[in-house]
Amino acid sequence: MKRIFNLFYRLLLISTLGCEGYAKKIGVKIGKNCRIYISQFGTEPFLIEIGNNVTITSGVKIITHDGSTWLINDEKGRRFLYKKVIIRNNVFIGVNSIILPGVIIEDNVIIAAGSVVTKSIPSGVIVGGNPAKIIGSYSEFKKQAIENNFSKKDWDSSKDYRTNILQMLDKTPKPYLENKFL
């Protein structure tokens, strides 16, 4: 019964405070101008720090402990390992990424969808993969986005959302994977 009450209470908090407000309520430190689209912050949310201008998309997992230490048990008992996760400013974390304990993500970082971040990330890079590796430069991404993408000023508020999106739609397909077997 207590589990059901706690679940409803959690859902009530999320629906009234939003994901960001809920995260703050349970102990996550969050800066200004953030977009948080997750509501699960593990068992130690007080070990998570998020800076300003951070987007955490859906499905992202932030892990602050190593559960495998449960296997280590001697005369002193079970072992525990807890580490903070620190996300600095101007960071985008793509869908379904996993951030492991002890990771620090510095400023101006993009983490590609589905990445598994096992090490800290320096400023000014794009990372992706499992395990995540540096795959690009934030400054180059920014330059290309300014040159090639629509801006907020291009949005026509006299038109509906769908019409605006269709007018801004990039119809260029991604290149095909290189087939080295042909």
Image: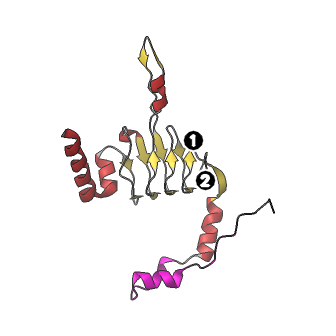
- For label 1, the residue is 118
The amino acid marked with disc number 2 is Gly
Q: Secondary structure at mark 1?
A: loop
* 109 left or right of 62 in image: right
Rendered view: 64 above or below 107: above
Mark 1: amino acid = Thr
At x 25%, y 49%, the residue is 10
Is residue 181 visible from the viewing direction of this image?
yes
Decide if residue 144 is on the left or right side of residue 42: right
Q: CA distance from mark 1 to mark 2?
A: 11 Å
Whether pointer 1 and pointer 2 mark residues with C-beta atoms closer than 8 Å, the reply is: no
State the image coordinates of residue 66 (x, y, percent, origin top left): 47, 32
Q: Position of residue 17 (x, y in %)?
A: 26, 57
Q: State the residue position of label 2.
A: 128
Residue lying at 56% horizontally and 51% vertically, measured from the top left: 115
Q: Position of residue 169 (x, y in %)?
A: 54, 80
- Quarter of the view holding residue 78: top left
